[in-house]
Amino acid sequence: MILLTGGLGYLGSHMAAQIIEQGHEVVLVDNLSNSQFAVLDRLSKLTGRVIPFVQIDVRDKAGLQQVFSQYPITQVVHFAGSKSVNESIQQPLDYYDNNVNGLISLLYVMKEAQVKTIVFSSTAAIYGEPEALPIPESSRQAPITPYGRSKQICEQVLQDLAHAEKGWKIAVLRYFNPAGAHPSGIIGEVPNGIPNNLVPYIAQVARDERPFLQVFGSDYNTVDGTGVRDFIHVQDLIDGHSKALAWLATQPQVFDTFNLGRGEGVSVKQMLDAFSKAVGREIPYKVVARRDGDSASVYADASHANALLGWQATRTVDQMAVDTWRFYENLV
Ligand code: UD1
């Protein structure tokens, strides 16, 4: 049985749908800090299954111990964590506490339960301003926000643990820019306040909830002057997790880190065009000043995941736009 922490969040819910479909048993835990209980119903509808769910915070060790004693867990995918870059600058203690202490609490409980396989959600934010493109895993790490630094510390904790104790099987996955939704339109990234990230913002403009997209700068040295990122379809990202779990199962013990991206840069304008096509009308935008801390271009060298996990992203930016829009159209 696979434990998904943050199981009702954007990535956790897509992972749950996929591995249930593959025939695995899952148990989800989530503290509902950035997710909704209603997602559990949507997952049940999607999979036709009753899915075990426990509402706890991963920092609650006693609660986690209870989950491990109640369910025959053999592998863990740890999605639970705080991910807003802006918020992390305002509330660094909360971010270090939730992300770092959450992981440590989980690892203590896993160790006690003799469960030593974990896939960890990390981020391309670990690299900061890229020193070269595409970015390989060995690239310099220079995160510029508490969010990025909290993930960097987590990676270090995992690496030190794998070094110190036998038997741990650990895959760290560094996500580039997840986008898109499940093709059913039933689950997706549920909007929470004013989005910082590009794709949810565009979707809200498309729904007329906001008047226009602010394009942060059009004077970058890129294909059309707007920022370039490595957007990756959430279903591809989740495929990467499934492959990582399968690969870990073949290893006696291991620690390794993988970039998950398409390895291709897509500009803000290109994403906007893909969305306009999906929605069937032009999406209004205004070019404004650059956003502090943004790089011109960020995209992955994902060849390591391809070589070891046999993984490669296959879905296009058009698919990300179409699937995101289907989900938003279904939202009430
Ligand atoms: C941001 C975070 C990064 C985090 C990632 C995923 C910053 C500086 N970086 O990355 O640490 O890992 O989210 O959560 O916040 N854009 C607009 N208008 C908008 C929103 C975005 O033009 O309203 C542009 C940005 O300038 C950028 C691109 O769209 O060029 C993507 O932005 P975003 O979705 O926020 O992702 P990142 O900047 O890559």
Image (cartoon, helix red, strand yellow):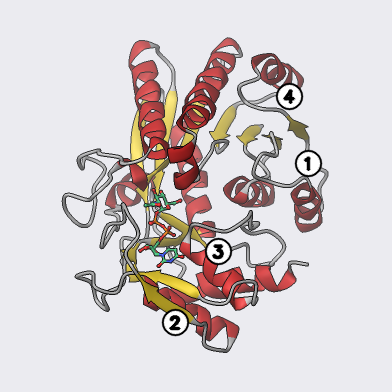
Residue 316 locus on image (x, y percent): 44, 71
Q: Earlier in the sequence, mark 1 or mark 2?
A: 1
Which residue is at a point 30% across and 55% down the rendered structure image? 300
Residue kind at label 4, given as amino acid type: Tyr
Describe the element under mark 3 as helix, strand or loop. Answer: helix
Tags 2 and 4 touching, CB below 8 Å: no
Ligand 1 rendered quadrant:
bottom left
Residue 228 locus on image (x, y percent): 31, 66
Rendered image: mark on residue 273: 2
Query: Which residue has dot 3 on it?
Result: 200
Rendered image: mark on residue 71: 4
Distance (Cα) linking label 1 and label 2? 38 Å
Nearer to us of marks 2 and 4 is 2
Distance (Cα) linking label 3 and label 4? 35 Å
* Left or right, 51 with reference to 209: right
Residue 127 locus on image (x, y percent): 28, 44
Describe the element under mark 2 as helix, strand or loop. Answer: helix
Describe the element under mark 4 as helix, strand or loop. Answer: loop
Distance (Cα) linking label 3 and label 1? 27 Å
The answer to whether the residue bearing label 3 lies less than 8 angstroms from the nearest atom of ligand 1 is no
The answer to whether the residue bearing label 1 lies less than 8 angstroms from the nearest atom of ligand 1 is no
Describe the element under mark 1 as helix, strand or loop. Answer: loop
Distance (Cα) linking label 4 and label 1? 12 Å
Rendered image: mark on residue 51: 1
